[in-house]
Amino acid sequence: MDEALELEIGHKVLEVGGGSGWHSATIAEIVAPSDAPKEKWGHVYSIERIPQLAAFANANIEKAGYKERITVIHSDGTLGYPEKAPYDRVFVAAAGPKVPEPLVDQLKEDGVLLAPVGGAQFYQTLIRVRKHKGQTIQENLGGVAFVPLIGKHGFDQ
């Protein structure tokens, strides 16, 4: 997933579906490596809709020493996090019926978004979206299986 995002040092990344915080840490290692000067660091904003899981992720991130590089937000990830938009990269770690439009809107020009799209329980396709000159170009990266994306622009609870 990190490879498909084409991450670089300094990128500002939005992750939807933060889970335990593990994936945020892998992203932070690329966009804000500890051996790079802090002024070159990017940042990861990770949204998690389940309050207990957001707290768990936050505790894991703090224990692992990533607090300066990752911010955990408890919210509906399908709405994104407009307060810190636009983002260089957006990653959705849950499958929705389509790519949530608010996330595309919060993507920078020439940004990359990854989102699994398909049914709530069965076959899904990993879609890479590139935003270029106000247009979006979608690319099918193959079949995947993710938990359902719950929220305003996902599946119902």
Image (tube, helix red, strand yellow):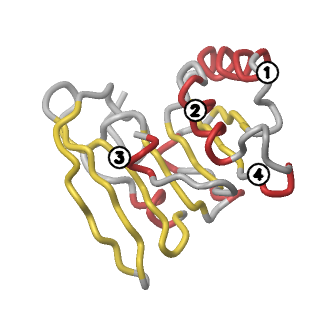
Q: Which residue is mark 1?
A: 62
- Which one is closest to the eye, mark 2 or mark 3? 2
- Secondary structure at badge 1 equals helix
Dot 1 or dot 4: first in sequence order is 4
Instruction: Measure the alpha-carbon separation of dots 3 and 4.
Output: 24 Å
Numbered mark located on residue 26 in the image: 2
Q: Nearer the viewer, residue 136 or 140?
A: 140
* Disc on the earlier residue, 2 or 3: 2
In the image, what residue type sits under mark 2? Answer: Thr
Mark 2: which secondary structure? helix
Image spot of residue 155 (x, y percent): 31, 36
Question: In the figure, is residue 56 to the left or right of 40?
Answer: left
Q: Are marks 3 and 1 in contact (CB under 8 Å)?
A: no
Q: Residue 12: percent from the left, percent from the top?
A: 65, 55
Q: Are marks 2 and 4 in contact (CB under 8 Å)?
A: no
Sequence-wise, the earlier of marks 2 and 4 is 2
Separation (CA) of disc 1 from disc 4: 17 Å
Q: Position of residue 146 (x, y in %)?
A: 30, 28
Residue under numbered circle 4: 41
Q: Tell me the distance, in whole angstroms, between the alpha carbons under discs 3 and 1.
A: 27 Å
Asked where in the image residue 106 lies, by quadrant, the reply is bottom right
Pick out the residue farthest to the left. 123
* Crowd rating for badge 4 (residues with CA inside 10 Å; few <14, some 14–19, many 20+): many
- Mark 1 → mark 2, Cα distance in angstroms: 14 Å
- Viewed as shown, does residue 11 lie left or right of 115? right
Q: Which residue is mark 3?
A: 115
Indicate the amino acid at tag 4: Trp
